[in-house]
Image (tube, grey):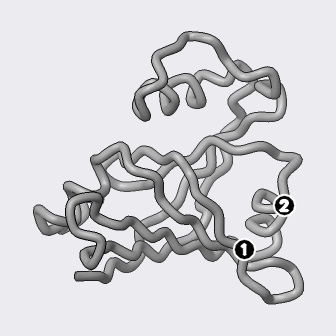
Amino acid sequence: MTLDLTDAQRRLLELPIYATLGTVRPDGTPQVNPMWFAFDGEHIRFTHLRTRAKFRNLQANPAMALALIDPDNPFAYLEVRGALVEVIDDPTGAFYVELQNRYGNPSTEAPADKADRVILVMSVDRLSGK
């Protein structure tokens, strides 16, 4: 599936900017954290740990929302709503390494917690912003 994105939306999804990812805790309250991400043209991918609350949140409720703020104009933003559609084991931490390089921290070394690493794959169901 190819997404019909505006140039501004595509730009924000392709820039190496920190995004804010929101999930829903088991008690119904939101949890929001800054995240590295990569957009593959269809899905958004994050590196994460199986041991973290966000991972547990998504197992109970796969709904997710991502906010991207334009670094050149903080009044311009993109909200992406979707859901967790896949969890991919990443025991070598390869995707973490890919993202740390994308975000300007050149290295080939995987993190110490690589054995617990996963790739969270988010669908892109709805886009809004200005």
Q: Residue at x 75, y 24 (%)?
A: 91
Q: Residue at x 82, y 73 (%)?
A: 60
Horizontal placement of 1 versus 54: left or right? left
Tag 2: residue type? Ala
Residue hosting label 2? 53
The crowding category of the residue bearing disc 2, from other C-alpha atoms within 10 Å (few below 14, some 14 to 19, many at least 20), is some
Camera-nearest residue between 101 and 24: 101
From the viewer's perspective, is residue 100 above or below residue 46? above
Residue 18 spot, x, y in % from top left: 46, 52
Image quadrant where residue 63 sits:
bottom right
The answer to whether mark 2 and mark 1 are in CB contact below 8 A is yes
Camera-nearest residue between 100 and 84: 100
Residue hosting label 1? 31
Q: Residue at x 62, y 72 (%)?
A: 22
Tag 1: residue type? Gln
What number of labels is visible? 2
Split into 4 quadrants, where in the image is the C terminus? bottom left
Image quadrant where residue 32 sits:
bottom right
Q: Residue at x 59, y 30 (%)?
A: 96
Assign a secondary structure to mark 2: helix
Q: Point out which mark residue 67 bears.
A: none
